[in-house]
Amino acid sequence: MIFEKLDFIDQLPLEAYPKHFGTAYKPRATPKRFRSNMMLNPLNLKHLNRIDTMSADMITLNLEDAIAPARKQEARYNIALFLSHLQKSRSFIIVRTNPLEEGGAEEISFLNDFGFDAIRLSKVKTQTQIAQALTLLAPDKELHISLETKEAFESLGSLRFDPRLTTANLGILDLLTSLGLPQSLITLHNPTIDYILSKFLIDAKRAGIHPISFMFQEYHDTEGFLAWCQHEKRMGFETKACMGPKQVAIANSVFGVTPRERDRAIHIKTSFETHAKEGNNGFMDEVYGFIDEPIYRDALLVLQHTQGGDDA
């Protein structure tokens, strides 16, 4: 926990918040993989107080549509207060802002000096918005985007012109509305939803952007969430948006590397490198059959994903 007691915050008027900001600055997170991205409401002080101990690989502090306009300043100050007393966290911490023209620009400018890892910009449509956000954003922080509009869905592959834009989060409810499609389409194996997921995944990968799949709204339906995670892993996704700890545990398990997968990758890596020293880059292995350079590269990718978190 960041604070032992939260009583003092309940007594603070908004104008008193800046007097209580601390001087801590969390070191930049450097995980090698992301399995779970948990959304957190900064008006929930008990949850906000535990961002130093949560098991989510990513935590997104949400300033956008879950916060009523009358409470956005309070939410922004809560984020600043807790971040300024946060010494460390295993999670990669993101702040989801409003669109630039709806308060996002002010939110970025206000929060820039606090210790977090990325800004997530909502309702992106154009390169111009990306450029404006990057101009405002501190150079040590990444830019993530919420893909929620038909314009961004169509042009995702061309939005990345700066390496600080690293990640896109699929906001499927808003995207469907933007496309004029009903949300009732969101069912497993629906061909339209699978097309959206596939296009988003491939366009993001082709552009060098990390794609994060959408949030499953039925928090207590853990079987449904598990089924979506398994389906999306088969498609090629590595990260799932999560509503809370129950979903985080499932996503971390599904998108983690199992001991069997890790052992296979280690065997292939060791065997290939041994044969390569003898000038043989394609050979029959007693355990896994034919191994060549593409199979070796895939094993390296698996091993890369075992770094930066606890394996399943």
Image (spheres, rainbow, N blue to C red):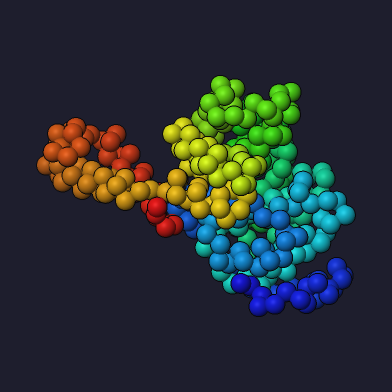
Instruction: Name which quarter of the figure residue 140 lies in.
Output: bottom right
Residue pictured at 68% horizontal, 66% vertical = 46
Figure disc tally: 0
Residue pictured at 61% horizontal, 64% vertical = 51
Q: Is residue 45 left or right of residue 263?
A: right
Residue pictured at 44% horizontal, 57% vertical = 309
Q: Nearer the viewer, residue 252 or 135?
A: 252
Q: Nearer the viewer, residue 201 or 47?
A: 47
Give the quadrant of the N terminus: bottom right
Give coordinates of residue 229: x percent, y percent: 50, 40
Q: Is residue 153 above or below residue 141?
A: above
Instruction: Name which quarter of the figure residue 214 lies in.
Output: top right
Residue 6 seen from this side:
yes
Most extreme residue toward the top is 191
Give coordinates of residue 190: x percent, y percent: 57, 24
Instruction: Name which quarter of the figure residue 54 lies in.
Output: bottom right
Q: Is residue 253 left or right of residue 116?
A: left
Q: Is residue 187 above or below residue 296?
A: above
Q: Is residue 152 above or below residue 90?
A: above
Give coordinates of residue 241: x percent, y percent: 59, 45
Residue 196 seen from this side:
no
Give coordinates of residue 150: x percent, y percent: 69, 27
Q: Is residue 263 above or below residue 125?
A: below
Q: Is residue 234 left or right of residue 71?
A: left
